[in-house]
Image (spheres, rainbow, N blue to C red):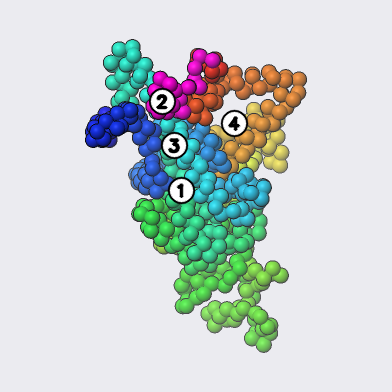
């Protein structure tokens, strides 16, 4: 409904109360309704799932329509990202938020900082989704509240044109609420545990769940060693559990992102069940590193495979894990991705050890031979040394092209000495266009940075501490924080307004009228930032 429709509806309702609701302002109710558009997480999940589906179709039509997100570990961080996006670009179109399991483990666990090994409380993940959407909804409420104040000012000044323009802006208001791609790790247990957690995450508002094919109790960060994968049937049971959770809760177009860690995972805990040659279990087992044996040499406890009439013993480590053949990672990734898409996944995630378009595209090309519209979510990870990787890629390309590289030491390319050089400039340009180029060449629909604000918080805090506790004193804060906030138009310079003080004042006036004791009067120091 439009702003005026809400007012008319509430006026009708008030009129039916025989005078007992005459102290209620229909326009104030209309404003509160518009400031609280989403009543619960399921409404958000339905709304944002539709956004992602439209964006996926737009990408299929033109890869230039790729999407982006940044990782969040607090509701305020997510809120400020979307406020900044609306401020700088005027629209949140094709821009999402990412909820990183790594950051939940490192920053949100009651145990304190933990490694990315699914040791944190699983309930902290849906709690963070709910928190993010609470802050995004508050950003709506704050911004609309300021628009309503402008409407009142236009009326007081008799400026009907300005009032009409503002009313139109309210009716066409774009919410800060955007899709969240939420990390459910390896499901935090069996398929039932995955289903229960998925429901909580969806109820909190998640329209997209990202799940990986590692063993839950051996889960590792995607960019660390020691990763252990599970057979496809085990993983697909968890994918189906997520789909059942979406369907049970009425989110028929919920998105499942299946992540394969097979490129860097050389181990498995289980031998897959195979009912006939060539089935998915047999294909999984075909990558095991095996040795042919004489039946007479079989040892107690051995696992023996029969492959084309030969008896093979998979190599078992002292950890009781089985290892895959070296160099089989890409083939396993391709099989993982095709199998996932054939069994209910919507998007893929291939965890790589470096940001290299040709490597990613090589796998995607093979996947698309089977499933032409296969699309990826890609982790533009801070675990990569982007500067070194791209300088080395340029160096290697120059060598292959016969260009002179005698001025460069490939082992020292990270050095600041190389920053102004042609090689470093070309590398930076490749980094700048990486997302655009990878979207076009490697089928990447969504680019995300998992841990950006973990690093920005550390960097900005280090710089402030160095100057404030050093010779700059208070100037270290004023010059590099507050003055910069004022001149760059950062909303948080008015931190009382950002925390909801003005919203509270509006409510006080609704509830108590002229008797309201408001915080935003002449003596509020936030007025110093009015300019």
Please state which of the two labelled residues, at mark 3 or mark 2, is closer to the viewer. Answer: 2
The residues bearing labels 1 and 3 have C-alpha atoms spaced at a distance of: 13 Å
Number of other residues with Cα within 10 Å of mark 3, as a class: few under 14, some 14 to 19, many 20 or more: some
Q: Which residues are magenta?
A: 503-523
N-terminal of the two: label 1 or label 3? 3
The residues bearing labels 2 and 4 have C-alpha atoms spaced at a distance of: 62 Å
Q: Which mark is residue 204?
A: 1
Q: Is residue 59 left or right of residue 76?
A: left
Q: Secondary structure at mark 2?
A: helix
Magenta-drawn stretch contains 325: no
Q: Which residue is mark 4?
A: 425
N-terminal of the two: label 1 or label 2? 1
Q: Which mark is residue 512?
A: 2
The number of numbered discs placed on residues in the rendered structure image is 4
Residue 527 rendering spot, x and y as whole percentages: 52, 16
Please state which of the two labelled residues, at mark 3 or mark 4, is closer to the viewer. Answer: 3
Labels 3 and 4 touching (C-beta < 8 A): no
Q: Which mark is residue 137?
A: 3
Residue 507: tell me if it is visible. Answer: yes
Quadrant of the image occupied by residue 36: top left
Q: Secondary structure at mark 4?
A: helix
Residue 3: tell me if it is visible. Answer: no
Number of other residues with Cα within 10 Å of mark 1, as a class: few under 14, some 14 to 19, many 20 or more: many
Residue 113 rendering spot, x and y as whole percentages: 67, 47
398 or 307: nearer the viewer: 307
The residues bearing labels 1 and 2 have C-alpha atoms spaced at a distance of: 34 Å
N-terminal of the two: label 4 or label 1? 1
């Amino acid at each position: 409904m439009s702003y005026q429709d809400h007012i008319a509806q509430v006026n009708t309702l008030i009129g039916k109360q025989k005078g007992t609701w005459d102290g209620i302002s229909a326009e104030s109710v209309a404003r509160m309704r518009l400031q609280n558009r989403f009543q619960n997480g399921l409404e958000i999940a339905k709304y944002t799932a539709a956004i992602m589906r439209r964006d996926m179709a737009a990408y299929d039509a033109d890869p230039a329509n790729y999407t982006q997100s940044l990782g969040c570990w607090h509701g305020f961080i997510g809120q400020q990202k979307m406020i900044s996006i609306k401020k700088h670009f005027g629209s949140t179109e094709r821009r999402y938020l990412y909820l990183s399991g790594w950051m939940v483990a490192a920053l949100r666990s009651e145990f304190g900082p933990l490694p990315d090994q699914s040791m944190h409380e699983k309930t902290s993940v849906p709690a963070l989704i709910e928190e993010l959407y609470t802050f995004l909804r508050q950003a709506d409420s704050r911004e609309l509240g300021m628009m309503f104040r402008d409407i009142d000012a236009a009326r007081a000044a008799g400026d009907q044109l300005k009032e009409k323009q503002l009313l139109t802006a309210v009716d066409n208001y774009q919410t800060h609420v955007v899709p969240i791609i939420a990390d459910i790790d390896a499901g935090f247990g069996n398929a039932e545990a995955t289903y229960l957690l998925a429901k909580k995450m969806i109820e909190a508002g998640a329209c997209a769940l990202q799940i990986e094919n590692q063993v839950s109790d051996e889960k590792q960060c995607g960019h660390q060693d020691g990763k252990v994968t599970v057979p496809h049937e085990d993983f697909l049971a968890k994918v189906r559990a997520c789909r059942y959770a979406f369907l049970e809760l009425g989110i028929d177009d919920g998105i499942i992102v299946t992540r394969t860690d097979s490129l860097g995972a050389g181990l498995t805990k289980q031998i897959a069940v195979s009912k006939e040659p060539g089935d998915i279990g047999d294909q999984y087992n075909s990558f095991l590193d095996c040795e042919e044996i004489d039946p007479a040499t079989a040892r107690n406890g051995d696992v023996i495979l029969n492959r084309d009439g030969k008896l093979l013993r998979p190599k078992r480590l002292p950890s009781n894990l089985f290892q895959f053949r070296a160099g089989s990672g890409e083939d396993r990734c391709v099989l993982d991705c095709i199998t996932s898409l054939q069994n209910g996944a919507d998007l893929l995630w291939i965890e790589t050890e470096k940001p290299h378009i040709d490597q990613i595209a090589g796998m995607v090309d093979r996947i698309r031979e089977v499933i032409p519209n296969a699309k990826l979510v890609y982790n533009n990870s801070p675990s990569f040394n982007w500067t070194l990787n791209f300088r080395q890629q340029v160096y290697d390309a120059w060598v292959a092209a016969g260009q002179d590289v005698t001025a460069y030491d490939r082992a020292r390319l990270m050095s600041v000495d190389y920053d102004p050089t042609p090689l470093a400039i070309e590398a930076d340009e490749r980094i700048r266009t990486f997302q655009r180029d990878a979207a076009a060449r490697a089928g990447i629909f969504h680019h995300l940075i998992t841990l950006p604000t973990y690093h920005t918080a550390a960097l900005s805090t280090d710089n402030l501490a160095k100057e404030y506790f050093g010779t700059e004193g208070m100037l270290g804060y004023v010059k590099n924080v507050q003055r910069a906030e004022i001149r760059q138009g950062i909303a948080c310079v008015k931190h009382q307004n950002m925390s909801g003080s003005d919203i509270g004042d509006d409510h006080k006036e609704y509830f108590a009228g002229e008797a309201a004791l408001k915080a935003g009067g002449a003596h509020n120091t936030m007025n110093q930032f009015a300019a």
